[in-house]
Amino acid sequence: MLPIPAEELNGSGTLGPYWTFYRAVAAEQLNRWLPADPSVILDLSGGRGRWSGQAARAGHRVIEVIDFRRTLDGSRLRDADRVRHVRADDLSFLPDASVDAVLAEERVMSIELMAESAMSDVARVLRPGGRALVCVDSLVLGMAILAEQGQWQHLRQTGEVMLVPWPDGSITRCFSSGQLRELLVGAGLEVEWMRPRTVLSPSTVDHVLGSDSRALNYLVRTELDAHPDDDDTVGIHLVASARKT
C-alpha cells in the first residue's frame, strides 16, 4: 500500500527531506489559518511549543496545555510573554466561550481515544465564530500499519472506528474524512474545509528536493494550491478547519 514503512510516515523515522517539506506545509497552513486580528488561542497540541510559538510570533496570546508527563525546557519559554503554559488533562479550568481559536495539531485527537468528549469540550470553550484546526491520523496510515503487522482481518473494517496499536504499545485512532466530519459536527461545529495534510508522496518530494534543495517553497505552494477536499484515499494525516456558529 505504501512504499516505505508506516512508522516512517508517522514521523518517527528518518525521511529527512519529506519531513522538512511536511513541517513547512504545516507551518504555512497555520499561517493562512490564524485569525487576522490578535486573538486568544488554545493550543492542545502536546506541549512541544512549535505551534504556540508560531501563533505568539504572529501577535496572538496563547494558552498552551502541557501534558503532566512532559517537561518544559528553556527554548519553549522564549515566548512566555504571550504564551501561558497550563498543566492539565482536561479543559475544566477554562470557562465557556473563552477562546477565539483552538489548535489540535500533532494528531492529538487520534491519541485522545475519547475524542468525542474532547471535541465537545473544545466547542464549549470556543466563542461564537471561533475556529478549531484539527489534525488526525487517516485510514491510509492505519491500514498501512495493520498490513505491516499482518492484521489482514481488520483491513475490511474501515466503516468502523479503527484503533491501531503502535510498536511502543500506544494506540492511535484513525479517521476517514466522513468520521472526522462526524466528530466535528457532533460537537456542534461547522466544517469549513477538510483535506489531507499532504498529497505529494515522499518519493516525489525526495526526488524534487534531491535535485534542487531550493525547490522547497515551490513544493509547499504546489501542495497548498491543490484542493483534494475530503479525499481520504491519500495522505497519512487529515486536517480540518471547523467553526462554532
Image (cartoon, grey):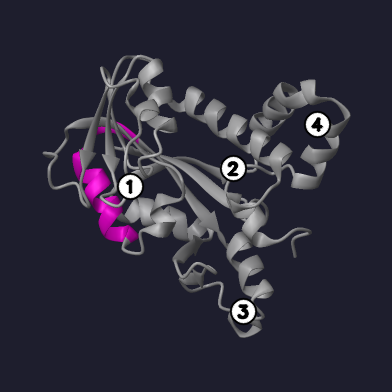
- Residue 191, how many percent across, how many down? 42, 43
User: Quadrant of the image for the N terminus?
Assistant: bottom right
Viewer-side label of 2, 4: 4
- Name the amino acid, label 4: Leu
- Residue 167, how many percent across, how many down? 54, 69
Residue tagged 3 = 156
Separation of residues labelled 4 and 1 (CA atoms): 34 Å
Please tell me which of labels 3 and 2 falls first in the chain.
3
Q: Quadrant of residue 213?
A: top right
Viewer-side label of 1, 2: 1
Separation of residues labelled 3 and 2 (CA atoms): 24 Å
Residue tagged 1 = 70
Separation of residues labelled 4 and 3 (CA atoms): 36 Å
Viewer-side label of 1, 3: 1
Separation of residues labelled 1 and 2 (CA atoms): 26 Å
92 vs 62, left or right, is left
Residue 182 visible? The answer is no
86 part of magenta stretch: no
| Residue shown at 53% from the left, 60% from the top | 176
- Name the amino acid, label 2: Arg
Residue 82 versus residue 137 in the image, above or below:
above
- Name the amino acid, label 1: Arg
Viewer-side label of 4, 1: 1
- Residue 134, how many percent across, how many down? 43, 44
Q: Quadrant of residue 40?
A: top left
Residue 113 versus residue 244 in the image, above or below:
below
